[in-house]
Amino acid sequence: MTDWQVDRLAGALGAEVRGVKLAGATEADAQRISALLSEHMVLFFPDQHLSTDEHVALGRYFGELEGHPELKNAYMEHPEIFELAATKGGIADEWHTDLTFLERPALMSILHMVKCPPSGGDTMWTNLCAAYDGLSAPMQELCDGLTALHDEAPHNRPDKTMIHPVVRVHPDTSKKALYVNEHFTRRIVEMNATESDVLLRYLTQWVQNPRFTVRYRWREGTIGMWDNRATQHFVLNDFDSERIIQRVTVMGDQPQGVGAPKWRPWVRPGPLSATSRFDRQLYFHLKSQGRV
Ligand SMILES: [Fe+2]
């Protein structure tokens, strides 16, 4: 095993790793990367310049790969590679965890910065376990018992919905992570629409507190890997030249909460009214699951 140089980048999360060649990484390398990822949650490997074959081969060490469910790149030879070119309108400048509208959201994302502006277009990540730990005990106890509805509205599919626990227990570390995000999470299932709005706005802004975050300045050829079960990320939309990323996504497991939800889903009583529109999406999701 060669010596790797691991430099922590911020108090909350993130490390830069040098001294490893990811092209032709071995099983032992992959195990070491997994251990580092558990510790740092997001890792950066500068000067890698992987081919798409090498990128996909690296991803396969960590599990089954999947392309993006809606955004396809028909011109790429690998369906597992998802390419986003900012000049074509793809800037993820809302805080999110990838693909939380799926039943089994991505476990890990591996990003290759293919082309980036000389400055601008940094990405930020936030540590969702630190965000949970920073809540008061009564707020933690409330959140432990709740679930939330996510949808794919950002990709024009608000009909694709999924319910996940508000607090997710990490399967490897058993740490609790605050698992709601402003991009895909719409509604606390057990609360009325007004209460849900207040709590979701608070929680999704809380995770953005700078002390839970790291900000990374990219160079072409850098590989970034993050644990999608314990982080959110955000791209700074402060550039106007070309920024192209290629991402390989390792499919994950079904998020597990602290226990069963403590309360029943909130379903509007009485006849339909003007404000029922706030409850319609939740109602139809619950109906599709046979829960109302
Ligand atoms: Fe993302």
Image (cartoon, helix red, strand yellow):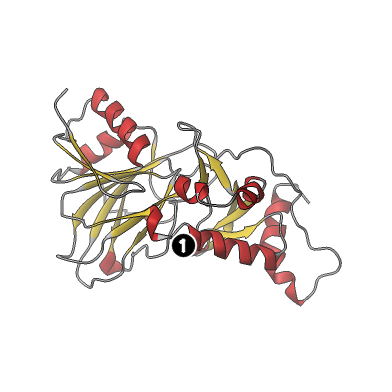
Q: On the image, which quarter does residue 95 sit in?
A: bottom left
Q: Residue at x 22, y 57 (%)?
A: 217
Q: Residue furthest right?
A: 270
Tell me the kind of residue under disc 1: His
- State whether residue 79 appears in this view: no
Q: Nearer the viewer, residue 92 or 73?
A: 92
Q: Nearer the viewer, residue 265 or 56?
A: 265
Q: Residue at x 26, y 48 (%)?
A: 9
The answer to whether the residue bearing label 1 lies less than 8 angstroms from the nearest atom of ligand 1 is no
Left or right for 99, reference 143:
left
Q: On the image, which quarter does residue 85 sit in?
A: bottom left
- State whether residue 206 appears in this view: yes
Residue 114, above or below 226: below
Q: Position of residue 206 (x, y in %)?
A: 49, 60
Q: Nearer the viewer, residue 115 or 20?
A: 20
Q: Position of residue 234 (x, y in %)?
A: 37, 60
Q: Position of residue 93 (x, y in %)?
A: 37, 65
Q: In which quadrant will I find the N terminus? A: top left
The residue pinned by badge 1 equals 155
Q: Residue at x 42, y 64 (%)?
A: 94
Dot 1, how many residues are within 10 Å of its Cα: few (below 14), some (14-19), or many (20+)?
few
Q: Secondary structure at mark 1?
A: helix
Q: Position of residue 183 (x, y in %)?
A: 48, 61
